[in-house]
Each structure stands twice: as C-alpha cells, then as structure tokens.
Amino acid sequence: MTGKKVGYAALGGGAGAVASQIPGLQLLNLACCALVVGGGVLAVYLALKDDPPAQAAPYGEGAKIGALAGVFGSALSVLIGLLILGGVTGLMGLGALSDASGEELESLGIISAIAGFGAIALIVFSLVINVAFSTIGGVIGAAIVHRKAPAG
C-alpha cells in the first residue's frame, strides 16, 4: 500500500472519528455505525478514484484501506474522547481533592483503577468496532469507485 493510500485512510478514518464526536450528528452511528462506515467509504473513494478501469472490483484493496481507516479513526476517536473526559473529570476533581481525607483518597484511587480498566476495555472495543465497520465501508467504497474495463 502506498503512502498516498495510507494518507487517504487517515483522512477518511479521521473524518469519521471527528463526525462521531459531534453532538447530534453522532446519532447517525446508531444506524449500524454509519459514520464509521462512511469514513471507510471516503478513504477508499479518495484512494482509488483515479485508478484505471479493471475487470474486477478491487474489494481486497478496499477492505485493506477501510481497515486502516478504522485503525486511524479508532485512535483519533479514543484520543478525543479521553481529552474530553479528562477535562471534565479534572475540573470536577480539583475541588474535591482539596478537602479529601486519607480514606477518601484511597477510595478515589480504587475508583481510578476501575476507571482505568474500563478505559482499556473501551479502547479495545472501539478498535474492534471501528475496524470491522470501516472495513465494510471500504468494500462498499470499492464497489462504488470501480469502473469496469471495456471487454475485448
């Protein structure tokens, strides 16, 4: 896979990830992860739109580009989510820590450990879901972009 196709995968995956974080627009992901699938379609469209006509549609290439877009999209989505979550919890926790006793700090540590394990589970889940649905989008994108070569 060329560097140009990797760049398009990053662009498509990033567009799906950013769109998935916009309030209201993120509801489209309730319809079979439509924004994630759309990121895969966009990545493949950009990567393969200038390819010459061929007899068979490049489904394999579309799936690879879509899967890579899913990896990029998942990474960006998790990063944005953690930044938002970290900012909100950081602002809420600053005031609470100033008056906290030893027992409260110990329970806060336990809660933080549980939240850390939850964050890891969320990252793995996001990666699996984004790669799966973006790969589907990549295959759909390959079917959309494919131009059949003339017979003969």
Image: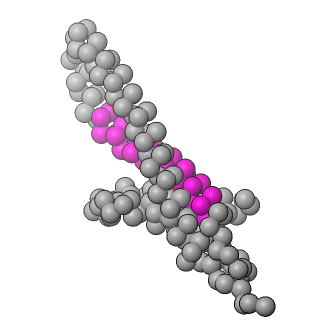
Q: Which residues are magenta?
A: 62-90
- Percent across and percent down for residue 13 are 52, 58
Q: Residue at x 64, y 63 (%)?
A: 60
Please give left or right for residue 54 compared with residue 78 in the image. Answer: right
Q: Residue at x 34, y 40 (%)?
A: 85
- Confirm whether residue 11 shows in the render: no
- Percent across and percent down for residue 41 are 52, 68
Q: Residue at x 32, y 17 (%)?
A: 109
- Confirm whether residue 25 shows in the render: yes
- In this rendered view, identify the residue nearer to me: 33 or 54: 54
Q: Residue furthest right?
A: 152
- Percent across and percent down for residue 65 are 61, 60
Please give left or right for residue 147 compared with residue 139 in the image. Answer: right
- Predominant SS along the magenta part: helix
Image quadrant holding the N terminus, namely bottom right
Dividing the picture into quadrants, the one containing residue 47 is bottom right
Q: Residue at x 50, y 62 (%)?
A: 136
Q: Is residue 67 magenta?
A: yes
- In this rendered view, identify the residue nearer to me: 74 or 89: 74
